[in-house]
Image (cartoon, rainbow, N blue to C red):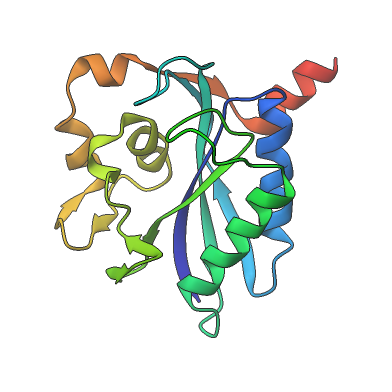
Amino acid sequence: MKDVMIGLGSNMETKLAYLNQALAKINSLDQVAVKQVSKVYQTEPVGYKDQDDFYNMVAGLEIEPGKPPLDLLEDLLAIEADLDRKRTIKNGPRTIDLDVLLVEGQEIDHPKLQVPHPRLQDRAFVLVPLAELDPNYLVPGIDKTVADLLASLNQTDLAGVEALGQLTDLLEDREA
């Protein structure tokens, strides 16, 4: 089994439902199991600013050795399409965004997939939930832990990441 960390984000209503549906679809993939999930964090958009805040989280997956990361990426892109993701504005609004962040012990440089994710070390909305799951994860190619990368971010970036709670609790609260 190989551990994979993926980032999930949504900034179109209903954000929590999209995150939940994406996790369920990921967990139903062949040769893939969701093993852990971070809290949901509310963050301001990066790049294109004229849009709603995002809900972001990270999930730790276990994939069987026979499933290459590129196959996982294709599955994630299919889930995005199934959840009506449209790519009309770069860094624009989206129902769901699924990114392969890390693949245990691997660096991948392929036209469709770069691992570690190329902007991982600059993104508080990725590093905060990633550190929640595994602060001591040594990022290949960067040779720093997630905690070290998080500590190197400026306080302004970190202040824009607000923990909302566990997805299951947030969904229950919304239904109550």
Q: In the shown orientation, is residue 66 left or right of residue 31?
A: left
Q: Residue furthest bottom?
A: 66
Q: In the shown orientation, is residue 130 left or right of residue 107?
A: right
Q: Which residue is pictured at 22% across the width and 63% down the height?
A: 140
Residue 34 in sight: no
Residue 49 in the image: above or below residue 47: above
In percent of width and height, residue 97 lies at 54, 42
Q: In which quadrant of the rendered view does residue 119 lie?
A: top left
In percent of width and height, residue 163 lies at 48, 21
In percent of width and height, residue 110 lies at 33, 70
Q: Which residue is pictured at 51% across the width and 17% down the height?
A: 51
**141 vs 129, nearest the viewer:** 141
How many marks overall?
0
Q: In which quadrant of the rendered view does residue 49 lie?
A: top left
Q: Which residue is pictured at 19% across the width and 40% down the height?
A: 149
Q: In the shown orientation, is residue 117 left or right of residue 11?
A: left
Q: In the shown orientation, is residue 63 left or right of residue 131?
A: right
Q: In which quadrant of the rendered view does residue 48 lie?
A: top left
Q: Residue furthest front?
A: 88
Q: Residue furthest right?
A: 176
**92 vs 63, nearest the viewer:** 92
In percent of width and height, residue 130 lies at 39, 42
Residue 152 in sight: yes
Residue 57 in the image: above or below residue 106: above
Residue 65 in the image: above or below residue 54: below
- Image quadrant holding the C terminus, namely top right
